[in-house]
Image (cartoon, rainbow, N blue to C red):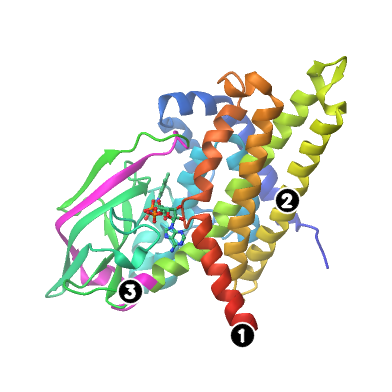
């Protein structure tokens, strides 16, 4: 078994690491405080090709494989989880449905624009449909060669800045997942309005909004896949998206580990550095071991996806293991910092807030366990 990264993977990771250290990390605290990210940072990321990272080269992307993409996501999350989620939603659930299920005309029309930096968002969650996404009530009524969308989506990452929205809606009067359809909807569509921005605990650099549809007319050509594929497309997008969230959690977890080790090496109590005190050393050893184990799962899921093999089970396992390990690492990092860990002067306070949502979005930890148990049931019964 070869654990070495390819030259290309190392080069991509190092390029993004360098960018993240120079351009993102120094303003991460400020972005958190101001709940946003500067336009010039977005422009620099656009110029560096970050918006086309996971896009096929034929549509203007960099064509990074999933392993490379994961390594890059980890580096971005280490610097700012908020910036990271803006890019991961764009590069995965916001664009993957178009790349995988769009007609050739739709791919040619939208993917190059997305790869060039016109931001994509993903609209599935609704007030009454979270973990149970099939309970969505937004409707898509056929009207000649168009569909009319009506309903409300919540918690839409990139809502404020997005140029395009992948939207899942259903035939009026139906229930369940069969009569659901997925569309690519441009922002300027009359009847689409971006609503309230959430005031969040963490990921404050990233915007999360309500998106309303009121008689929004979408050409039938904007249907992704076939009629009735909506739920399937959303679940396929989330399978891949979960690999990204696993690496995002790992990035935050690794930032916690690095900060905790640095702090414990210089902070002295009882006449010696905390790092030399066995209880603290044990905490650090557990953080490192759990994160490393989770990284292997995430890399395996990414490798399976790149190999064209089924990866849903490993993606769910990776997301569960990484987000839970990173959460424990954040808690320990705050504990190791003592009272200072509770203050904004130290970045672990932000990491602790940022990491929390990785156990919630793109399927909560409870839902990952349901998915994993379903797979294991199929494997062994
Ligand atoms: C910052 C942020 C960004 C987001 N971005 C997006 C986005 O871009 N697009 C999008 O569509 N959505 C997005 N979401 C929504 C996110 O995916 C949902 O919040 C998530 O799926 C959980 O749904 P819910 O909040 O409705 O919780 P609920 O489904 O109401 O769950 C509440 C609790 O009950 C548990 N639970 C529910 N059902 C079960 C069960 N059967 N067994 C055991 N436990 C269960 C859950 O695990 C959870 O702990 C985002 C959310 C946040 C917070």
Please, is residue 112 above or below residue 270 in the view? Answer: below
Q: Residues within 10 Å of mark 2 (few under 14, many from 20)?
A: some
Crowding around mark 1 (Cα neighbors within 10 Å: few <14, some 14 to 19, many 20+) is: few
> Is label 1 in a helix, a strand or a loop?
loop
Residue at 27% x, 76% y: name it. Answer: 179
For the residues carrying marks 1 and 2, which lies nearer the camera in this image? 1
Please rate how many residues cluster around mark 3, counting C-alpha atoms within 10 Å: few if below 14, some from 14 to 19, many from 20.
some
**Corner quadrant of residue 380:** bottom right
Q: Nearer the viewer, residue 12 or 303?
A: 303
User: Residue 145 — which label?
Assistant: none
Q: Secondary structure at mark 3?
A: loop
Over which residues does the magenta segment extend?
203-231
Q: Is residue 307 left or right of residue 143?
A: right
Instruction: Name the residue at the bottom extreme.
Output: 381
According to the image, label 1 marks what residue? Answer: 381
Q: Which residue is mark 3?
A: 177
Q: Residue at x 53, y 29 (%)?
A: 28
Q: Could you say which disc has been placed on residue 10 in the image?
A: 2
| Callout 1 touching callout 2 (CB < 8 Å) | no
């Amino acid at each position: 078994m070869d654990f070495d990264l390819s030259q290309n993977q190392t080069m991509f990771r190092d390029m993004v690491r360098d960018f993240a250290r120079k351009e993102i990390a120094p303003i991460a605290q400020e972005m958190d405080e101001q709940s946003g990210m500067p336009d010039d940072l977005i422009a620099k990321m656009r110029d560096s090709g970050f918006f086309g990272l996971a896009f096929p080269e034929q549509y203007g992307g960099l064509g990074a494989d999933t392993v490379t993409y994961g390594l890059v996501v980890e580096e971005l999350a280490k610097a700012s989880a908020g910036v990271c989620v803006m890019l991961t939603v764009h590069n995965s659930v916001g664009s993957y449905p178009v790349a995988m299920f769009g007609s050739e005309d739709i791919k040619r029309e939208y993917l190059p624009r997305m790869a060039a930096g016109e931001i994509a968002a993903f609209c599935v969650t609704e007030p009454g449909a979270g973990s149970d996404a099939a309970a969505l009530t937004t409707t898509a009524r056929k009207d000649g060669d168009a569909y009319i969308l009506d309903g409300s989506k919540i918690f839409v990452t990139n809502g404020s800045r997005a140029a395009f929205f992948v939207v899942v809606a259903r035939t009026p009067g139906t229930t369940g997942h069969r009569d659901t359809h997925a569309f690519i909807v441009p922002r300027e569509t009359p009847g689409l309005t971006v609503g309230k921005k959430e005031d969040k605990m963490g990921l404050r650099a990233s915007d999360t909004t309500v998106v309303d549809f009121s008689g929004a007319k979408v050409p039938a050509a904007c249907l992704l896949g076939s009629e009735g594929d909506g739920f399937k497309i959303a679940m396929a997008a989330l399978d891949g998206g979960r690999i990204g969230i696993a690496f995002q959690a790992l990035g935050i977890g690794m930032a916690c580990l690095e900060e905790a080790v640095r702090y414990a090496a210089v902070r002295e109590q009882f006449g010696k550095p905390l790092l030399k005190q066995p209880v603290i050393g044990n905490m650090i050893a557990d953080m490192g071991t759990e994160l490393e184990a989770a990284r292997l799962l995430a890399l395996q899921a990414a490798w399976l996806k790149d190999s064209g093999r089924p990866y849903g089970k490993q993606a769910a396992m990776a997301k569960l293991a990484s987000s839970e390990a990173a959460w424990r690492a954040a808690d320990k990092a705050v504990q190791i910092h003592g009272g200072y860990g509770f203050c904004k002067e130290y970045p672990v306070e932000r990491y602790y807030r940022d990491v929390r949502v990785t156990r919630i979005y793109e399927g909560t930890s409870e839902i990952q366990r349901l998915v994993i148990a379903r797979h294991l049931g199929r494997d062994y019964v």
